[in-house]
Amino acid sequence: MRWTSRNLDTILAALVTHLELVLAALAIALVLALPLGLLAAGRPRLSAWLLGSASLLYSLPTLAVFALLVPVLGLGFAPALVALATYALPVLLRAIVAGIAAVPAPVKEAATGMGLSPWQRRWRVELPLALPVMIGGLRVASVTVVSAATVAAYISAGGLGTLILTGLDQGHTEKILVGAFLVTALALALDQALGAVQRHLPRLA
């Protein structure tokens, strides 16, 4: 472990960059998915179109998406951020639509009977009850993005993938193992943190 002990600053910088990339991508995806999901919920045609379009983007290979973005955005953080947000969006969108759809009809009827408008009911009743399902989707999206962010090293976006990529190029086993371990640890840490939040939320009956 000599290389590790001598390069802690490099390893920490790669970890921080990886985490920044992941959190920024999840934030952008959530900002886009939330209004789209709320709009699509209860509208089968719009929901099917949005989910179908998002799933099509999700099915594209990671490197192919990077290759499409590089001519427009260049190399580095920006194209990686856009690509990762694109991967997280379908997962979050599906979770939001599914969570709101799972709210029992009597609860919706009671909210309407109390004089709430459709949007008031959506924000004050349905969205809070859908949070456990949404957090579940965020858990899946976080693990997906942590993994996909590793490939961003190919377009000079930095992160833990840089350790793995340079390790492969140099035949440096320790670099590869450190990068792979930290990617796995980061994915597990985010999943466990979000899981703890999810367990403390009220669940639908």
Image: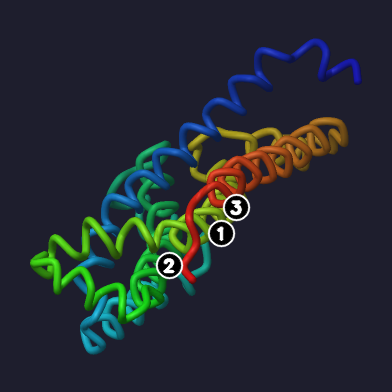
Left-right relation of 122 to 61? left
x, y percentage for residue 162? 63, 35
Residue 129 occupies which quadrant of the picture? bottom left
Where disc 3 sits, the SS reads helix
Q: What is the distance, in whole Å, between disc 3 and disc 1 at their CAs?
A: 5 Å
x, y percentage for residue 192? 65, 44
Left-right relation of 150 to 100? right
Q: Which one is in front in this view, the residue at disc 3 or the one at disc 2?
A: 2
- Residue for badge 2: 95
Q: Residue furthest right?
A: 1
Residue 24 can be seen in this image? yes
- Residue for badge 3: 143
Which quarter of the rendered picture does the N terminus lie within? Answer: top right
Type of the residue with mark 2? Ala
Residue 67 can be seen in this image? no
| Residues tagged 3 and 1 counted as in contact (Cβ below 8 A) | yes
